[in-house]
Image (cartoon, coloured by chain):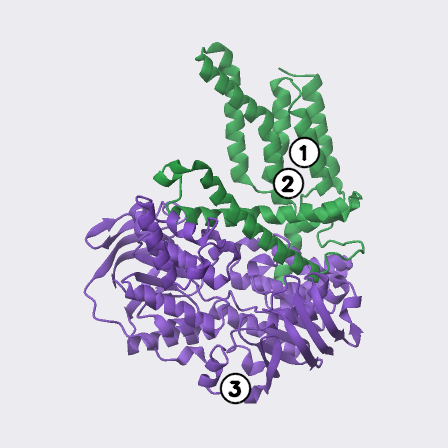
Amino acid sequence: MEQLQAVVETRSGYRLDPRTKLFLMAVVATAEFLYSHTAFMVAVALIPFVLLLTNRQYKTAIIFFCLFSAGLFVQAIQNSIQFHMVVNMLVVLLVGLVLRLFPAFVMGAYIIKSTTASECITALGRMHIGRQITIPLSVLFRFIPTMQEESAAIKDAMRMREVQFGTKKFWQNPAALIEYRFIPLMISVVKIGDDLSAAALTRGLDNPVRRTNITKVGFTGWDLITVLIAGTALIITYFFSPW
Amino acid sequence: MIELKDVSFTYESGETENSLKHINLTIHDGETTLFCGESGCGKTTLTRLINGLIPHYYAGKLDGKVLLDGKELKDYPLYQIGQRVGSVFQNPRTQFYNVDTTSEIVFGCENMGLPVSEMSKRLEETTKSLKIENLLNRSLFALSGGEKQKIACASADAICPNTFVLDEPSSNLDISSIKDLTEVIRQWQSENKTVIVAEHRLYYLAPYADRIIYMKRGEICNEYTREEFLELDPKELKKMGLRALNPFDLMPEKTPEANEKSLQIDNFWFSYEKRGYPIVNIPDLTLPQGEIIGIIGDNGAGKSSFARCLCGLDKSSKGTLKLNGNALNAKKRRHISYMVMQDVNHQLFTEDVLDELLLSMDGENEEEDKVRAQEILAGLDLSDKLKLHPMSLSGGEKQRVAIGSAVASGKEIIIFDEPTSGLDYRHMLEVSEKLIQLKEMKKTLFLITHDPELIYKCCTHLMFIEHGRILWHRSMDNEAVRLLQEFFSREKG
């Protein structure tokens, strides 16, 4: 019983509806391509950063923070230092990548970690998206960690057989390395998918009734507050930049 | 009540294995029925008929009638059958749909559209009756196989069906997890549920089953009451291709030979974090060469991590292995050791069996390599499979191809991780014969296994790991057998 209390406790508190998360994702992905002041870019980056903190993904948050700050720093000093042309190109490319694409990547990391598969199916169902889309999508959620596990095992197996970069066998046929990595992965993923579907169907996945969810899916005050704060920050920094 | 009336089934692929022929059977409410028989005898197919996966998911040719409480199952959609028949499958890794335990337990209820209050009530009841309070709200990927299987049982239980169908549920479990599984089944029995289990391992369930049905080549060959079955002679069971009813108290069949050559382990040390708690910590260990060394210990004691250290798979593992006068660090150990993984699909890469072996050879002289590869394959009874795709082979054949590639690469240490999980008596025997064959080739074998029959069959040396340390290791003598049995009885609880 105490355990059950604990569950309810961790489930309440700050959480967003999956739909809000998707909306914020769209906002971040669009906003990061609007050329603007540093303040605006910081505001964009802050959205996924703060969300990561709320979901206790501290490691990802810190890495993102460091990279983004480094990106800003390099951008700031870029004009005062003369790099070699090739180096300069690389630096511009990398900085652009970090400043303009990473917020969306990190947002993705947050969404995947903070949304359970079943929340996702329910929320998408509420958006009147058909099951032919929601079910594969929720399977995808489930599959990412599985693919990582499988892929790690295959990598081990390859190292054990000394099928790896730089060996004599490798130079004879470099493309084979990719084949060896992916074919067992595909085969096992297909097999797992098959077992998984059978198991899910015996639990009534194809039941046409309206699905319920133990975590309450639906908009709360948190969604409103989050969207308002994020929106205000973006608008202010976009139109009235302090810098 | 479940009735099968003259049921025959053949899978779409047309293979005769796993098909069923003219099955007539009635299972009454509240009965526990155990289906046993060699692999391919059709017991899994039978479970699929009862939970509706045949014909709704696995297609094929179905004749006869499968009735649940008088209604024919093929006329009802799977989600309706699922509310009356709960299913637990063989592989704990591939039957959960969610990433966290709590969502997984209530997954079936959510699909039924139960109101949240009812769902919470069921979650609480299931949690209590299956004693899984400590597993709630965890990531499923962080659980052990046994814990995952418990969640699978809980997920079936929360739907509140009257019948539970379990398809080889103990295949991937260790002895103490099997004990937990037995308790779950006992719980269902106490609630007067109908329990149907297809299984190779018989020791844990036979004492509680009401009926034991022995199948052969798709037919019901014999039916026993519990008392009759428990009276069966061990020799009779072997002849039927069944696993022992008391696998823990057998006698070792292989004796160690006097062997001067040894391999020496110095300061094996591995931890996930720098200066963290060591998962493997073996300051000094001398083991004989050319033996079959069984590695035993609890779940999470460090058996697999030790094996990974031995193979040099973890770069950060410290320590050396002295073999034939050479001190080998982790990287060098990779040249002399090989692990046959539990899921052997991960280690077969090429398009045909012969290529698979050639890949492991140095490729200096292709003609010579080919001849040698063919010899090795002949020794593994794979001569007729040279040109087949490894993935088209059966599980045992794949395992043998993996063994072949280890032999081809001239590795001296071969580690087996649970090579007999989910195998019937005959296939277990086959594996143990191959192990002995490798030993005769002077290979040093390490065997991580929960299978007592396999240990008694072929191990000549045992080592016991606890908290990453070796508590004891010795040749398979009377004292080792005593210690082994002590370990088993502790695991059995």
Q: CA distance from mark 3 to mark 1?
A: 62 Å
Say which of B439 and A200 sits in front: B439
From what the image shows, is residue A116 above or below residue B188?
above
Q: How packed is label 3: few (under 14 Cα within 10 Å), some, or many (20 or more)? A: some
Q: Chain of mark 1?
A: A
Q: How packed is label 1: few (under 14 Cα within 10 Å), some, or many (20 or more)? A: many
Say which of A170 and B465 sits in front: A170
Residue A123 visible in the picture: no
Task: Report the residue at 73% width, 50% height from top.
Answer: A216
Q: For residue A111, which numbered disc appears in the image? A: 2
Q: CA distance from mark 3 to mark 2?
A: 55 Å
Q: Which chain gets the green colouring? A: A
Residue B427: where, in percent of width, then height? 46, 70
Type of amino acid under label 3: Leu
Whether labels 3 and 1 share one chain: no
Task: Report the residue at 60% width, 72% height from top.
Answer: B42
Say which of B157 and B87 sits in front: B87
Residue B32: where, in percent of width, then height? 63, 79
Tell me which corner region of the image, top left, top right, bottom left or bottom right, holds residue B183. Answer: bottom right
N-terminal label among 2 and 1 = 1
Q: How packed is label 2: few (under 14 Cα within 10 Å), some, or many (20 or more)? A: many
Query: What colour do you see for chain B?
Result: purple
From what the image shows, is residue B291 above or below residue A29?
below
Of badges 3 and 2, the one in the foreground is 3
From what the image shows, is residue B74 above or below residue A108?
below
Of badges 3 and 1, the one in the foreground is 3
- Which residue is tagged 1? A25
Q: For residue B230, which numbered disc appears in the image? A: 3
Discs 2, 1 touching: Cβ within 8 Å: yes
Q: Is residue B117 toward the left or the right of residue B246 in the image? A: right
